[in-house]
Amino acid sequence: MSLTGEESPSAAPPAVAPEPLRRSRARSAAARVPESAALIVVLAALVLFFSLKTPYFFNTDNFINILIASAVVGIIACPATMLLIAGQFDLSVGGATALVTAVFAQSFVHYRPLIVSVLLALGTGIGVGALNGFLVTVIGINALITTIGTMGVMRAFAFLETNGQAVGFNGFETLGVTRPVLNVPWMVWVFVAIVLLTMFVMRATTFGRSLYAIGANPAAARLAGIRTRRVVFVGFVLSGAAVGLTGLLLASQTGQGSGNAATGLEFSAITAVVLGGASLAGGRGSIVGTILGVLVISVVNNGIVLLNIESFWQDVVRGTLLIVAVAIDQLRLRLTAE
Amino acid sequence: MTALLSARGVRKSFGGVEVLHGVDLDATPGSILALLGENGAGKSTLVKILAGDYVPDAGEITIGDARFEHLTPITARTAGVRMIHQEFQDAPTLSVAENISLGRLPASRGLVRWRAVRERAEKVLAQMGVDLDPGAPVGKLRVGERQVVEIARALSDEARVLILDEPTAALSQQEVERLFAFLRRLREQGTAIVYITHRLDEVHAISDRVQVLRDGSVAAQGETTRFDRSSLVEAMIGRAAAAVSRPPARTWELGERPALELREASSAPAFEGVELRVHPGEIVALYGKLGSGSAEVAEAVFGLRRLSSGVLLVGGSAKPAKGPAVSIGRGVGFVPADRKREAILPVRPVAENVAASSWRRLARLRVFIARRSEAAAYRRWHDALSIRSRNDPLQPVITLSGGNQQKVVLARWLERGSPLLVMIEPTRGVDVGARAELYASMRELASQGVAMLIATSDYEEVVQVADRAIVMARGRITAALEGDAITTSRLLTEAGG
């Protein structure tokens, strides 16, 4: 079916006056200034700053350390970006990751085969994600409340599973320790793979488009025929899958399962996502931005350690970054609002 | 009797356009004045000036002995002018008594005197002759009762002039009668009442005097008994009616099997016993004022509302649709009334907005979607619907004007190829030029075999676009008009009852 051009009344005056058009152009340009550009500037400034302050910063080994530190937060931050773009949160990632390390450790030290332990760990992560998704989309509890609840429950389960102790093991070094190529460990390569995969999903699949649409306007997305609850549910399951993977990486890296693992992970992930330009109002954000956000956080943490500053300052910086990022988001929303 | 409140020569402009051209109004104690007029006639602006919400550009307002150049919400209230808004301005979780004292709780040294709160409520409710529990939370009350609480709040604050803005829009017939009985009692007690409405039948039922506004001027006024229905309609629409023309006669054949059919369809309490049929190639308008049930019928067709009885056939199938995705799959496209809240994805690109309901078809293997194919979908409709944008598929849709946003929403369903389009208020907030273009596009679509059902409260829209018009009032069909029988005055008359 098509409309012929000649049927539309050509005599009608242009509906858009030139003046407001120019203004909206300026506005949308302001809205489109890639957060990424600003973040790259910040990142470069940080690198320059720490390079001048300490001789230990600017070298390959330290950069690999920064990437290793980025991997854990980064793998979680990818689905967290997806969820925030759809207007959702998952704060249970830290607690759930601890549970995954605990489940894996208990299974592995009791001589279950490695593959069974790995599958158990992944299943635990996915299970937590499915539970969150069920509570949010079927029962209809707000995501923030749901995942604050499961955050506490999952970390407590982790302590119960390990009787409050760290459970150590040997023989699972591949993921977190082994360095197959370029002296870079597997976990960093996994991180890179996850980033590429999520970038592809967000850019090139109907699922990614649906996430953006739901975040931009949930009511309109539903009325346009998008199965909003199904999409959000899958988003939570993906977050759970990332938790399973991250738990395995941490267990392999540290050689133990513990209720204390991954404390503050949800905090770092959300900070990175918001810093990367995803809007708390939904509908906007990118994986590239998030990864830059992750790198900023890792560089700051790394620099603080190298400068021998007390590590508590890491939390001060991270908290401040989160607030600054949200403030910028608010300013941008005000700028683009009518 | 002399007027308690008098406005003289009130003028008001918004953004350089004058919407009130020197209007007078008198409200007399013990009398009910009906203020009548179409949307945009200036009724709301006028009463907002009387309530102190707007500052007039010129004119004078006298209340009792006091003269004002303009009122503020506080001076209006102190002078005894109170307005009951269409949307309740109450606190639903608080009790009836607290709501009546809202904003002026009796207190000593910062502590609320709850007994005084209750006594005040009991006194005013008794005076009004209403039996309501002062302790009940307002949110639990029926709509009509909530309105009574709003009026009680005004009265307990010694309102001498009561302004009601379309108070019956959301009321059932029974509640309307109760409200009228109650307003008559207030009239006997000496309150001056200004009653805004666009329902003609109410004018004769309740008012002593009537004043009709048209395009910001007084078009008629006087004793209500001097007017009949048709003279009121004439005063309301004036010459404007002549400017609205019917579309050229249909040159195409209608499809034989109806795309949509409703038989004795009811969905309590919104509508009852609705019968209608839309054939491929036909535009049927469902005309009715807010609360008439026309929008709700449209929602039911799209599966957003369950029928309590009767039959709904979409493309011959009676299977009930569970949710929008299913309805869309069965070939129904839906243009909701509130474009901003329910239709557009504001920050997303125009191309995504067009493609949103067709992503699976546009994608390779139903999953992998390329920007290119979205952009192609956008370009297909950009020229055909003359969407005015930067011709940049990535431009956020929110930066387009209202009319062009609506074209984007229409393009969404054209891209989807929906054989039945259901629209609610399709040109609300769309300027006149873009409106004409939208109507032309809709006629063109009909010629290609699309069936359209348009629920609207804009009678000019009905005249300009519809092949047939079904008029609804209070949840029931009151008339079915066809061809040249569709005129503005017929529509207004049939919808008034």
Image (cartoon, coloured by chain):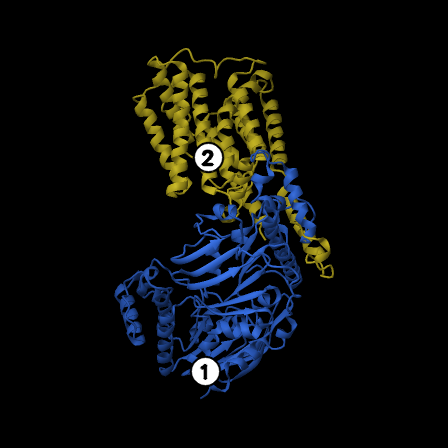
Chain colours: A yellow, B blue
Discs 1, 2: same chain: no
Name the outermost residue toward the top: A171
From the image, tell me which residue sits under label 1.
B4
Please give the chain letter of the residue carrying mark 1. B
Whole-percent x, y for residue B321 in the image? 45, 49
Q: Quick check: B355 left or right of A115?
A: right
The residue closer to the viewer here, A297 or B40, is B40
Name the outermost residue toward the front: B256
Q: Which mark is residue B284?
A: none
Q: In which quarter of the image is residue B116?
A: bottom left
The residue closer to the viewer here, A304 or B25, is B25
Whole-percent x, y for residue B378 in the image? 65, 45
Please give the chain letter of the residue carrying mark 2. A
The residue closer to the viewer here, B324 or B417, is B417
Q: Is residue B212 above or below residue A332?
A: below
Q: Is residue B92 above or below residue A104?
A: below
Name the outermost residue toward the left: B115
Q: Quick check: B55 left or right of A16?
A: left
Measured Cα–Cα span from mark 1 to mark 2: 65 Å
Do the residues under discs 1 and 2 have CB atoms within 8 angstroms? Answer: no
Q: How crowded is mark 2: few (under 14 residues within 10 Å), some or many (20 or more)?
A: some
Q: Is mark 2 on a helix, strand or loop?
A: helix
Q: Tell me the kind of residue under disc 1.
A: Leu
Q: Quick check: B434 left or right of B345?
A: right
From the image, tell me which residue sits under label 2.
A234
Total marks placed: 2
Whole-percent x, y for residue B404 in the image? 64, 54
Whole-percent x, y for residue A258 in the image? 37, 21
Answer whether residue A10 is visible to the viewer in this image.
yes
Q: Quick check: A138 left or right of B235?
A: left
In which quadrant of the rendered image does the N terminus of chain B lie? bottom left
